[in-house]
Amino acid sequence: MVKHSQVESPREACGILVGRAKDNEVRVSRVCACRNVHSDPTVEYLVNPEDQVRIFEEIDEDNEVELLGFYHSHPGGPNGPSQIDSSRNYWPEHLIAIVSLSPEPNVSFWKWENGRFRRQEIVRERF
Ligand SMILES: [Zn+2]
């Protein structure tokens, strides 16, 4: 995620997180980079619908994995959800990963619950 975000900077990078959620444990097994097709990609992102359909089809064909959520980057910060993110319609069950590149690369995980973002603690992993 960080690498993809750095390559795309100053445009926002975006993608889909695939893996397994069981009980309270979430295990991301694949980070699927998608193309940002937003008309103003330095301030917002829009996952390329073709990429999204292709990844959703791959998930459908694989019984071992499910859609966990989405990620996108903030090349110039903030280090968490932006005002734009709060105006998006996220599903409560989806994990939202935000890669901030400023002042240094950082990945945080969130869920949209009851009208606000709640930070999710992720214990380990390399991103
Ligand atoms: Zn954002």
Image (spheres, helix red, strand yellow):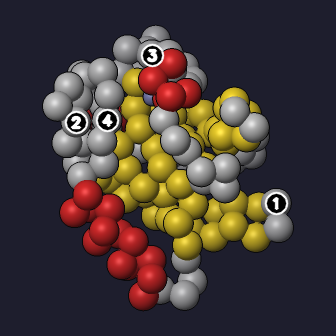
Q: In the image, which is nearer the foreground, mark 1 or mark 2?
A: 2
| Amino acid on which disc 4 is placed | Tyr
Taking the image as shown, residue 80 lies to the left or right of residue 3, namely right
Q: Are marks 2 and 4 in contact (CB under 8 Å)?
A: yes
Real-space CA distance between mark 2 and mark 4, rounded to the nearest whole angstrom: 5 Å
Q: Earlier in the sequence, mark 1 or mark 2?
A: 1
Residue of label 4: 45
Q: Position of residue 91 (x, y in %)?
A: 59, 51
Residue 94 or 64: which is nearer the viewer?
Answer: 94
Real-space CA distance between mark 1 and mark 2, rounded to the nearest whole angstrom: 34 Å
Instruction: In the rendered view, tell whether residue 75 sits above or below residue 95.
Output: above
| Amino acid on which disc 3 is placed | Gly
Residue of label 2: 38
Q: Earlier in the sequence, mark 3 or mark 4?
A: 4
Instruction: In the rendered view, tell whether residue 122 sits above or below residue 85.
Output: below
Q: Secondary structure at mark 2?
A: loop
Q: Position of residue 105 (x, y in %)?
A: 46, 25
Residue of label 1: 24
Residue at image position (22%, 63%) is 50
Q: Position of residue 100 (x, y in %)?
A: 46, 25
Instruction: Place residue 112 in its image quadrant.
Output: top right
Instruction: Place residue 56 in its image quadrant.
Output: bottom left
Residue at image position (53%, 66%) is 67
| Amino acid on which disc 1 is placed | Asn
Q: Position of residue 83 (x, y in %)?
A: 51, 18
Q: Earlier in the sequence, mark 3 or mark 1?
A: 1
Residue at image position (60%, 33%) is 108
Residue of label 3: 77
Q: Quadrant of ligand 1?
A: top left
